[in-house]
Amino acid sequence: MQVRVHGKMQKPLPELLKEYNLPVGIFPRDATNYEFNEETGKLTVYIPAVCEVGYKDSSVLRFSTMVTGYLEKGKLVDIEGIKTKVIVWVKVTCISSEKSKVCFTAGVKKSRSRDAYEVLRDGIGIDKF
């Protein structure tokens, strides 16, 4: 789904993530609607329903219906709307990309293999964020 922003066509979300050196599969496949302010770097991603996405490294991210954060080269910071499981569900506050690793800051910083997040995956519906 392409959305017009100020008269120009908005690129697909995976393309935007790639431009900022982030893995294209961080968000669920059906997260196609987003707003991005190039001046401030603020990214708002709309997800049709609260869901969990499992990745090939066995990690799981939980998404609210709206995720916000600030895009910088190689990282998404000040994130609201994503959690990951570290014994209990904790809020992800930063995702950064360093060569072959993707680092998730959620209370503690945890590095995961970047290639696990390079493929778009479907979210599985869940009851609550």
Image (spheres, rainbow, N blue to C red):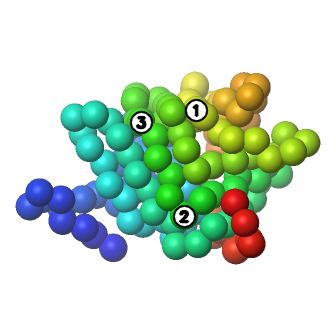
Q: Is residue 55 visible?
A: no
Residue 108: quadrant of the picture: top right
Picture coordinates of residue 113, whole percent (x, y)? 71, 37
Residue 60 placement (x, y as % from top left): 76, 53
Query: Along the polypeptide, which appears first: circle 2 or circle 1?
Result: 2
Q: Residue at x 51, y 33 (%)?
A: 78
Q: Is residue 32 above or below residue 100?
A: below
> What count of labels does the image hold?
3
The residue tagged with tag 3: helix, strand or loop?
strand
* On screen, residue 97 above or below 36: above
Using the image, determine if residue 50 lies above or below residue 41. Answer: below
Q: Which residue is mark 2?
A: 65
Label 2, label 3: how many angstroms apart (C-alpha)? 17 Å
In the orientation shown, which residue stands out farthest toward the right? 87
> Which amino acid, by three-letter code, is at mark 2?
Thr
What residue sits right under mark 3 in the picture?
70
Local crowd at mark 3 within 10 Å, few (<14), some, or many (≥20)? some
Q: Are marks 2 and 1 in contact (CB under 8 Å)?
A: no
Q: Give the structural element (helix, strand or loop) at label 2.
A: strand
Badge 1 crowding class, 10 Å Cα cut-off, few under 14, some 14 to 19, many 20 or more, is many
- Image quarter hosting the N terminus: bottom left
Q: Amino acid at mark 1?
A: Cys
Residue indicated by mark 1:
94
**Position in image of residue 54 (x %, y %):** 75, 59
> Which of the two labelled residues, at mark 1 and mark 3, occupies the earlier sequence position?
3
Q: Are marks 2 and 3 in contact (CB under 8 Å)?
A: no
